[in-house]
Image (cartoon, rainbow, N blue to C red):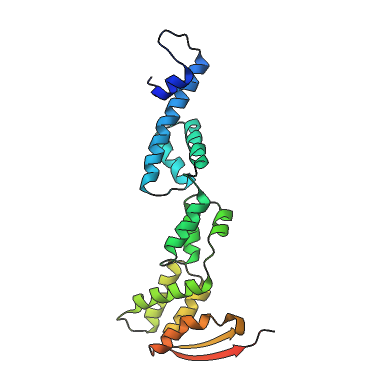
Amino acid sequence: FALEMLTVMKLGLKIGKDVDTETIKSAVLDSETSVAFGKAVDYLARAMKTTKQMREYLTKKVYSAEVVDAVIQKLQGYKYLDDQTYARMYAEQSKSHKGQRRIKQELINKGISHAEVDDQVQIDTEDQLATATTLAEKYLKNKPRDLKIMQKLQRFLLYRGFDFDIVNTIITIMMNIVVVVVTITGMSIITTLMRFLQAGALKLRLNLRMRA
């Protein structure tokens, strides 16, 4: 078997020196871990990965579970693997074209825990409404706004991961009539709708209610 030179130096191995079984096992583990760590760093150079993705990658390279665990622990120690940071950055990059529900599910599928996903992925409702509106506008471009198209739009937005309330709000807006009831503290939602008024695409009846 071949050993990394660093391992040989670390363990003080020399030609002709008697070596017991435990030392050999330790040397092999240390050497394999060193090689696997190098491959893991190269893998991370392409893009950030979750702990699950890294574990699957190293396992496919036929490294033992002991080596894989050692490499992952080392990567986490250097902060090369950080599921919380990954979840936060993934959400930030995805929120311009996906809804929160889909983003969360994709992160869970990548091996990040429900608790970490819930903690790191908190997209403002107004931001989601604005994103869904932009996607709906693109989807409806040059299309008639009839019932059949609106049903397809609804399925499209749900597939993108937006909640039912947001999707139904967008469908209502795109049908050109909406009644909006907001509290004084919720006035910011009007900003999202005003551009429809300016474009002449929306008849808006607004009821303001004071919050008790």
> What residue is rendered at 38% in x and 80% in y?
148
Q: Check the image and report above or below for 73 versus 6.
A: below
Q: Nearer the viewer, residue 159 or 87?
A: 87
Query: Which residue is painted at 47% across and 60% down in the image?
Result: 91
Q: Image height check: is 210 above or below 29? A: below
Measuring 47% from the left and 51% from the top, which residue is drawn there? 110
Residue lying at the far left of the rendered structure: 142
Q: Quadrant of the C terminus?
A: bottom right
Displayed quadrant of residue 33: top left
Residue in front for this viewpoint, 162 or 187: 187
Above or below — where is 134 with respect to 194? Answer: above
Is residue 175 at all visible to an observer of this figure?
no
Given the current orientation, which residue lies at the most extreme right position? Answer: 212
Residue 116 showing in the rendered view: yes
Can you say whether 14 is above or below 60 in the image? above
Q: Where is residue 181 in the image (x, y as percent from the top left)?
A: 57, 86
Residue 11: % across, % down: 48, 19
Residue 186 drawn at (x, y percent): 58, 80
For the image, the number of numbered tags is 0
Within the image, what quadrant is residue 197 found in?
A: bottom left
Quarter of the image with the N terminus is top left
